Image (cartoon, rainbow, N blue to C red):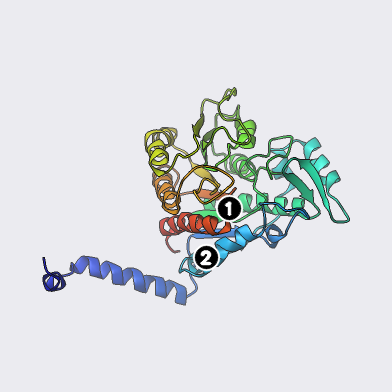
Amino acid sequence: MIASDFLRRPVPVGKMLRTYLRFFKRRFFRSIGYKGRTAWISSPHCRVAFTTVPHPEQPERIAAIEQLLHQSHLWARLQKIDAPEVSDVQLARVHSLRYLADLENRVPQQGGTVKIDEDTYLGRDTLAAARHAAGAVVHAVDMVMRKHAKNAFCAVRPPGHHAAADHASGFCFINNTAVGVMHAIAEYRLQRIAVIDFDVHHGDGTENIFANDPRVMLISSFESPLYPFTGTDYRGSNPNVFNFPLKAGDGSAVFRHLVRAQWLPKLASFRPQIIFLSAGFDAHSEDDIGHLCLNDADFGWLTRKIVLIADRHAQGRIVSVLEGGYNPEALSRAAKAHIGALIRAGGWF
């Protein structure tokens, strides 16, 4: 077919009308102040540098994501929410009182940092940020359960999935996702909650907290062997914990087959009432902290697959929580693909 023949081909009227309708619908909603149904929840406390030593977990991580969203049409379609501080009651559903008191007592008052382990440092502002990070997830749960948003992305730090019930580890102090899960159980009486962790590192803290709680399905992929060198020795009583270790060099084909063959059938069988994503983007091929080879498109593809499950079983309710991702450029692109899929699933109020 020559070019002139192609140009003479008629455009289907229905398709053209749908395109124009979407365009004018967006313009109309913006003009009258309507917001998108995806919430961006963050806090100025999460933009502070926590340590006085060089560290990959820096505030530029969130800034890079936000800057790229600003450069696209996506930022205008987000509800921007300032994260509240988590309450002591909400924290105590996940972490021991002794551990929480110890964290408070170890916060340096005159600057500097306190070394918790080989790569985890507590600064003067760390705990305030961690409390707002957990508060963001609690608020996200409230928003999706009360239909103030269909889904939410919590742009928070420090991350949380290595924090166990009684100790900090791997840059993490409060398990943000676990606090949100327990809030959903306590306040909304949900009985089937799925947590999907696609960080390059195993979410050992989340597994520790829910190892004996069959109300929570935990699906996790991660590079193995790699810090924290867990995920292949699960001994809990919860039958809904599924770990899928990947080896260095695994990329799109292996990951997508895993999702299709294992994750989606298990999620469909479980019929979750809400889905939490421990959204780590350090499995990206350009992130030097790991050796997996996912690309930007993989994170968007995964999100779209999870959206289908959420729409079918959970009224679309998804709460995504930032975990890892330490190359700001790769992180921002992967997160954009992820957030873009959430926005397209959410639509407009």
Kindly tell me whether residue 23 is visible in this rendering: yes
Task: Give the quarter of the figure containing the C terminus.
Answer: bottom left
Q: Is residue 289 above or below residue 346?
A: above
Find out whether the residues at labels 2 and 1 contact each other: C-beta distance under 8 Å: no
The spot of residue 144 in percent (x, y) is 53, 52
Q: Residue furthest bottom?
A: 31
The spot of residue 307 in percent (x, y) is 42, 48
Residue 68 numbered mark, or none: 2
* Residue identifier under label 1: 140
Which residue is pictured at 49% across the width and 32% down the height? 244
Residue type, label 2: Leu
Q: Residues within 10 Å of mark 2 (few under 14, many from 20)?
A: some
Kindly tell me whether residue 147 is visible in this rendering: no
Q: Nearer the viewer, residue 221 or 21?
A: 221
Q: Which corner quadrant of the image does residue 50 belong to?
A: bottom right
Q: Is residue 40 left or right of residue 254?
A: right
The spot of residue 305 in percent (x, y) is 40, 46
Which residue is pictured at 54% across the width and 39% down the height? 190
